[in-house]
Image (cartoon, rainbow, N blue to C red):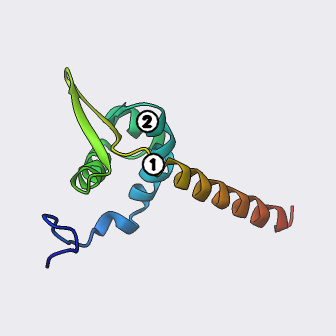
Amino acid sequence: MKSSLPGRRSRSSPSASAPSATRLVWHCSRPLFERDRTVQELCALTGTSQANASKHLALLLERGLVTRQRDGLFVRYGIADSSPQRLCHLVCGSLAEHHESVRASLPS
């Protein structure tokens, strides 16, 4: 099946709803906006395995969301387009506010 973007295949990603993918995106967006990171650094930040992080980064790379650059024995990943940074901060801020309001409403 073809997507609406020329030259891109449309395929559903089983990792889209995976907890490790969510953790990777949630915890890595800010560090990746700050600077490129190795898979090992991202694993340390997210608590996910190197295999899972590599799999999810490969999907993000395939979709053009991250860049990959070899640095000796390591591979560094970075954000391909920094324009979504504001959106990420808005979403993260909104989620944090919602979390705090829910937390405040719970009995002590």
Query: What residue did someone put label 2 on?
Result: 44
Residue 26 image position (x, y, % from top left): 50, 52
Q: Is residue 31 above or below residue 9?
A: above
Asked whether 75 or 107 is in front, the reply is: 75
Q: Which residue is identified by label 1?
A: 83
Q: Nearer the viewer, residue 87 or 59?
A: 87
Residue type at the position of mark 1? Ser
Q: Quadrant of residue 98?
A: bottom right
Q: Position of residue 89 (x, y in %)?
A: 58, 50
Q: Residue furthest bottom?
A: 1
* Mark 2: few/some/many CA within 10 Å (<14, 14-19, 20+): few
Spot occupied by residue 28 in the image (x, y as percentages of width and height): 45, 44
* Residue name at image x 43 percent, y 30 percent: 35
Q: Residue at x 27, y 68 (%)?
A: 13
Disc 2 element:
helix
Quadrant housing residue 40: top left
Position in image of residue 76 (x %, y %): 29, 32
- The residue at 25%/55% (across/down) is 59
62 or 54, which lies in front? 62
Disc 1 to disc 2, C-alpha distance: 26 Å
Task: Name the residue furthest right.
Answer: 108
Q: Nearer the viewer, mark 1 or mark 2?
A: 1
Q: Residues within 10 Å of mark 1 (few under 14, many from 20)?
A: few
Q: Amino acid at mark 2?
A: Ala
Residue pictured at 40% horizontal, 38% vertical = 42
Compare residues 59 and 1 and report the one nearer the observer.
1
Earlier along the polypeptide chain: callout 1 or callout 2? 2
Q: Secondary structure at mark 1?
A: loop
